[in-house]
Image: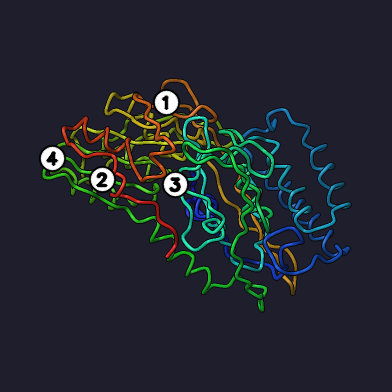
Amino acid sequence: MKRNAAAGLLCFAAIAAGSFPAAGTASPPPSGRAGTSAPREMSKFDRDQGRMMLGVIRNDLRDFYYDPTYHGIAFDQVFARAEDRIASAGTQAEIYAAIAETLLRLDDSHTYFVPPGWAGKIEFGWFTQMVGDDCYLQAVLPGSDAETQGLLKGDRVLGIDGATPTRESLSVMMYDQRLLAPRARTTLVVRSPGGEPREVVVRPRVTPQKRVSTNWDHAAMFREMEDQAWLDRHRFHFFGDDVAVWKMPQFDLTREEVGRIAGKLSKYPRLILDLRGNPGGAVETLEFMVGAFLGEKVPIGTIRSRRTIPAHVSRKSPERYDGELIVLVDSESASAAEIFSRQMQIAARGKVLGDRTSGRVMMSEYHDRKIGMGTTVYFGASITIADIIMTDGRSLEKSGVTPDEVILPTGEDLATGRDPVLSRAAAAFGVNIDPEKAGALFPFEWKR
């Protein structure tokens, strides 16, 4: 969860969408990455910039990270190793990887390095997700090289550049491939439903964006924000006057907005709250959401932190929703979405259906940073400031929420656009909608 939610959420949203805008540096991606320029020799200036970024990240981690023991890692040795790697790095990507490793060693879902952006917009054209313990293609962008090479929604992904994706590794693999050092090509081993494994080499679409300013490109940034706002809009569907479905993309609502939606839905005696793919969001939204479903001053969780942070307690919403509730989750439901789902289970307020959630549940802050005079380099880091211990005495980090009823789409379901999870939830409320029609209600969307 984010205390300054907007900045931190954009990173995970970009990873999911498979596209990253240029930001903060005029340097092209190095050879072997998603760019068109030839590699250049690393200069003393490049290495000095890397060391400066490393020093800033080190200070932020020392000042803000919630665990002063850093989970027992040898803090000074980790950063000394990163300095050695920067000294021998042959590309900017290797410099960024050296910095990123210092935070990845913590194995913390909300602590990660955000490097300077590459000078180009990169569209990968394919999106993966864990379903149970297997990885599947959830979407393939029409017109992309991924489509041209024959990748299909519903293909099971057996390998990505020689590594097997798992629940533990997939998010780090995508972070490396799509944010830290975007690839010029990716080799996938996939298997379509009923087919044999096949190897596919896929390339992203790169739109060069030459930098003429050392500042952020505000016009490009606002275009990205508009695209993201479209993807993050809250959607609804109603089955007559009895059952409402709320597709909630993230926890980004104000107190008034939570109340307005709760009031709108209160006329429907049954609600399906779809939190699949929801990466979490603001602490305040979580507290008002729990208030809208359980009332105010309900304990949510205590805080483990170096700071003095009050326990999470629900806050009063302008309107309540008191009808029956089913919550839908999947492996991409994270942070506040997980805490809300688990809170509904603990309070016996509603049933949770779907897949086990991601287990990425911490409280973090995003720190924008810049170095340099004349040529300015922008970068940053998300730093975990607290762990949340729920009222049952457990942290959801690494474990996630186990649904009351586990329902996993098959490869055939994904390939044909069927949604057995929403279909099952509707049936539990007396609505007969087959998985094909359920899947058409909230289809996967790419940027406009």
The picture places residue 273, in percent across and down from the top left corner, at 29, 40
Q: Give how far apart the Cα atoms at labels 4 and 2 are.
A: 18 Å
Q: CA distance from mark 4 to mark 1?
A: 28 Å
Q: Of label 4 and label 2, which has the lower sequence position?
A: 4
Q: Is residue 251 above or below residue 214?
A: above
Q: For mark 4, what is the residue?
A: 242
> Can you give x and y, in whole percent of width and height, for residue 384 in the image?
58, 40
Per the image, label 2 sits on a secondary structure element best described as helix
Q: Nearer the viewer, mark 4 or mark 2?
A: 2
Secondary element type, mark 3? loop
What residue is drawn where x is 38% and y is 49%? 249
Tag 4 secondary structure: loop
Q: Is residue 365 above or below residue 145?
A: above
- Which of discs 4 and 3 lies nearer the camera? The answer is 4
Asked if the residue at tag 1 contacts the one at tag 3, i.e. Cβ–Cβ closer than 8 Å, the answer is no
Q: CA distance from mark 3 to mark 2?
A: 30 Å
> What is the secondary structure assignment of the residue under circle 1?
loop
Residue placed farthest to the bottom in the image? 212
| First in residue order: circle 4 vs circle 3 | 4
Which residue position is annotated with label 1?
402
What numbered label is drawn on residue 328? none
Taking the spot 84% from the left edge, 42% from the top edge, the residue there is 80
Q: Earlier in the sequence, mark 3 or mark 2?
A: 3
On the image, numbered disc 2 is attached to which residue? 437
Front-lying residue, 410 or 261: 410
Q: Which residue is mark 3?
A: 281
Q: Are marks 1 and 2 in contact (CB under 8 Å)?
A: no
Precedes in sequence: disc 4 or disc 1: 4
